[in-house]
Amino acid sequence: MSAAPDRMMTLAQRFCGLSADARRALQQKMHAQGLTLELLPIPPRDRAVDTLPASYLWFLWQMQPQATAYNLTGAFRLSGELNPEALAQTLSALVQRHEVLRTTFVFDDQQVLQKIHPRMDAPLLEVSAGDEAELQRQIALNAEQPFSLHSGPLMRCRLIRLDAQQHVLVLTFHHIVTDGGSLPILLQEFTRLYAQLSAGQAPQLPELGIQYADFARWQRLWLEAGEAERQLDYWRVQLGREHPPLNLPTDRRRPAIPSQQGASVELEISTALTAQLRDLARREGCTLFMVLMAALQTLLHRYSGEQDIRVGVPIANRTRQDVENLLGFFVNTQVLRSQPRADQPFGQLLAEIKAEALGAQAHQDLPFEQLVDGLGVERSLSHTPLFQVMFNHQRDSGGPQRWDLPGLSVEPLIWDEKTTKFDLMLDTVEGDEGIHASFVYATELFDASTIERLGRHWLNLLQAICTDSTVALADLCMLDASEQQATLRDWNRTAGLNSDQANLLCAHQLIEAQTAAHPNNIAVTCDGVTLTYAELNRRANRIAHRLRERGVGPDVLVGIALERSLEMIVSLVAILKAGGAYVPLDPQYPQDRLAWMLADSGTRLLLTDSALLPQLPLNEGIEVICLDHASDWLLEASADNLPNLTAGLRHLHLRFHRQTQRHAAAPQQPDAAVQRHRALVRFQCAGCVEPVPLLCLRLFRVGNIWRVVLRRQAGGGAPRGQPLPGRLRPLAQ
């Protein structure tokens, strides 16, 4: 070894032996001279030190010890004459070579430590499979069993015998001891060791200068010396103080504790489109990853309507030559944030994504768990912190997909993994001819048809940005030809469709017709409580009769100030049945705005809840009915349908009065907008050509859109793949 490397190693060893304050002072001195500790080699620790601080994955395991989303599995087909003894010796040699495979985790009352054992067995379970279904079941059994981080081992091996010449080797690891970048290293060493041992030779691989624990110690000391604080300052600026979860429209409500069950939808980007995307990347001076990321963030913006989009990106975190042959949990996660606007050209968003990606690369060393803690993000078991969608782009290295050994060939086996840690994850693999894409999704949140449609929309966006990257995000074509036909033509056939019904009925009469036809069908559900059509109709009738007694009739405005609830739904229907029109008042609005809305609309009757009264600017001229105090009074009212007060022109009467956009001259005073029954009825009738349309009444827009979901007279469920936001959702008939 030359003198210069010796001096560098001596300096690195000295750095590790300093106190925390001295390490910080040394790093500051080196920075002042334009130097960095990253230039120093990682010194091996004293092998007598067999306990070191552990990864945050231990805490995730502690909260959900039965979860398997952090299991990492590789399956390999072994074709030929298998030597079982050489196979067992190969697995044992790998465990002995890499300390991380001999590691368990303990808690010493102050911190979690990794315990490195001098030896650990590598048990191999041998089973048989007679067909493909049994093979997949056996792989899943190995992959989906939880690990004990306390007792280990954290590598589980299963040999599946198909016949005398065909076997499948399944290796499952807990993510805390390995990552995706470790599997190719493991496979390369496995093939070399097996070839040597099956030939009766002693195992010979280049000695490892350091182990994963040495890297982990060096990284911790380096970050503690001021690097973590420097990088955290960058991320504080980039990510801000608020970190709301991304509200994608889902098919089902998010569970409090997800099962982490997943599935995937596979897509292929054609050779021609891939070439166009690469041309776009070259013109814009960026990478293909950046183009695909910008398209994904555009898709999420279009789906959610939000202007703060965060996507997680895994990085290999193997920037040093001295760790390139190590197994371990090196991978880190970055968060790329964009703030897209509907009128923003795609090219501008792409430039912002490029700047974000380059900045993230320069600040990639801060472990994700330290980023979360440093930003003060409140953790929840229901979703991952900082982001809920991940994007992983890889380049197909073109390396060997088959290894020929003495009497045996080894090749990776693709299997259907059924777990996910995120709401949605996009995996792309770039090859010479095209790009393979896979949308992995949480099955508790999404149906397969929803993600299939989302995937098609992403492909359409890719084609649109290649056609013209200067188009605004809102104007990029996302729908395919059939969806455009349905949106522009099929769903817009108001003329001539059920014209008699559209011209004669009011909205609440459609509800009454549905009640007569399907009284026991579920009409609406909220927070696990449901109402059938019969129950909805009876409760609304009682309120409607009381409203009639107070003079409510055609075009009379009735204010409603209620939180989202079944009572809100019942009250809205009741106002329509009484013949009036409702004025929605959000209790969260400023009082001066609510006062103006009440005065401008001339509202003289208000339905509300007693708990909300302090938030409402009421005057003596407004009669207030607190529904939570009026239950006995309402039960005495009739539950029968009310007669319509007018004939012939009732469809022209108001059903809805809302203050909308604000005046430019008076920004605190919104404009008033009205809607008549005819518009709603025609909207519903326009869907009569569809087998299962919904009648959706948009009621409020206060941050979120509130919708009441009512079945059309023919009945049916929600249009496939068109989930509604908010907590009010239809149930299948």
Image (spheres, rainbow, N blue to C red):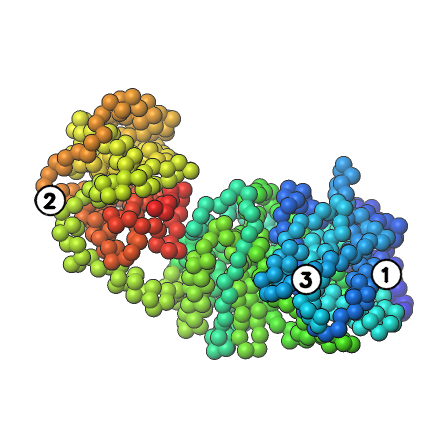
Q: Is residue 201 above or below residue 376?
A: below
- Residue in the picture at 57% in, 69% down: 429
For marks 1 and 3 on the same chain, the one whose residue lies earlier in the sequence: 1
Amino acid type, label 3: Ser
Q: Residue drawn 77% across and 43% down?
A: 106
**What residue do we see at 87% from left, 72% from top?**
201
- Residue 278 sits above or below residue 651 on the image: below
The answer, for residue 590, to whether it is visible in the render is no
Indicate left or right for 654 with 468 as reference. left
Picture quadrant where residue 173 is located: bottom right
Residue tagged by mark 1?
Answer: 9
Q: Nearer the viewer, residue 41 or 22?
A: 41
Is 717 on the left-hand or right-hand side of 371? left
47 lies above or below 285? above
Q: Which residue is mark 3?
A: 128
Residue 649: numbered disc: 2
Q: Which mark is residue 470?
A: none
User: Residue 296 appears at what percent x and percent y?
Assistant: 49, 62
- Please tell me whether residue 333 is drawn above or below residue 379 in the rendered image: below
Label 1 secondary element = helix
